[in-house]
Image (spheres, coloured by chain):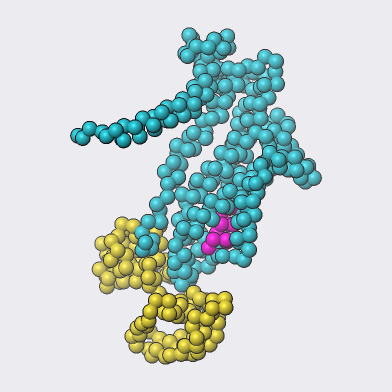
Chain colours: A yellow, B cyan
Amino acid sequence: MASVSFQSVEKAFGSTKVIHGIGFDIHDGEFMVLVGPSGCGKSTLLRMLAGLEEITGGTIAIDGKVVNDMESKDRDIAMVFQSYALYPHMTVADNMAFSLKLRKADPKTIEERVARAAKILNLQPFLKRYPRELSDARRDQGAAPAA
Amino acid sequence: MKAPTWRQVSTEAKLLLIGIPVAIWTLLPIYHLFLFSISPKEDAFAGKLWPDHPTLHNFEVVFREQHYYLSHFWLQIWNSLLIAVTVGVLTLLVATGAAFAISRLKVRGGRAVMNLALFTYFIPAAFLAVPMYKTMSSYGLLNNQWALILAMVTIAAPYSIWVLKQASDKLPYELDEAARIDGASPLQLFRLVYMPLMTPSLVAIGTYALLLAWNEYLYAFLLLSNERQITLSVALGNFLAADDSPWELLMTVGLIYALPPAAIYYVFRRYMVGGLTAGAVKS
């Protein structure tokens, strides 16, 4: 885990400002819930943290390091999408291993880590299945370790 | 079982009334082709529904290149194949790259390119034949098979880009974002996520471009003239140059020429349907 810090972060889409200078600190190990009416910018906030949206102003820091100009993949974070975002052409195991494969982890490590995550989530029987062969609840379970 | 209602009967009858004439309209020329190809020369115009002495002699003549017009049959069918496959592959390369850049990477000016691509279809390909001929001659490509390949890719690409762009727009964008967080570069995204998911569309477009080139006559006729360079479709046209055209051989070659497209459709038909992305995102 790591601490997360937002400092007067702003976001505008074109001329429409959606986040007007928000600031907060989440400490290491803390559990944080964002609540608000739809369209108030919760997802945008999360997406900015993940690096999927660029920020217009302010700074975002993860573990004390400013990540404003850092690519998503270099931020060492994971995200479970609202809509799973599982790769339909890969099995559950391949979905879970995808990120490690891209990071060129050695196959043994990948296998171990996938097995461990699958055990925690009781996904072992489904590792060889494709996302379309899973129920909705199982897809959610699959999306977490995949992230 | 319940007796069919009037409504069902009349719907069925209407479908049959349209379907049967369309089926006959479509199948009759093919049957005619087949009939000629198994008729001996003297029987070809007898006007019978089935020849008195059906024979495979015509096929033998064709395969052994035993006629003046057929002296390069195998070379010409090879030319057709080579050109069609190259056009298919090149079109796929160009169109997939363009569709990926416009639809997934959202490059600037993508919309303009899409509109321009569609705009090219306001001008019939036949109108472009003369400018294309002039262009190829300036590049010194006349009577070179690359001229035909490039021309066909030019004609096939806009439609292919359009179709692939529409198909890639349907892929959930979350997959791209998930891949970005997972650490995929645009090229890895293209290779590991985009291409596998686009396979059905890619096969469909590859087949489209391949068959477009395989069936092309006008451009092939204009751009190639050496009989060792031309495709079989041009060679077929040359049959008609004679006063006494060997119709039975023309039809035999025509039948042979029509078989690969039929085979390709048959083999790839399961790719023509989508459904691969089922289960990717909540709908």
Q: Is residue B162 left or right of residue B227?
A: left
Residue that lies at the very extreme toward the left in this rendered image: B1
Q: In terms of image quadrants, where is residue A143?
A: bottom left
Q: Quadrant of the N terminus of chain B?
A: top left
Residue drawn at x 59%, y 19% as measured from the top left: B249
Q: Which residues are magenta?
A: B95-104
Q: Does the rendering let one see residue B258?
A: yes
Q: Position of residue B10 (x, y in %)?
A: 34, 32
Q: Main secondary structure of the magenta part?
A: helix
Q: In terms of image quadrants, where is residue B128?
A: top right
Residue drawn at x 63%, y 60% as measured from the top left: B112
Location of residue B229 with respect to B71 vertically, above or below: below
Q: Position of residue A127 (x, y in %)?
A: 31, 62
Nearer the observer, B85 or B105: B105
Nearer the observer, A147 or B109: B109
Q: Position of residue B228 (x, y in %)?
A: 69, 31
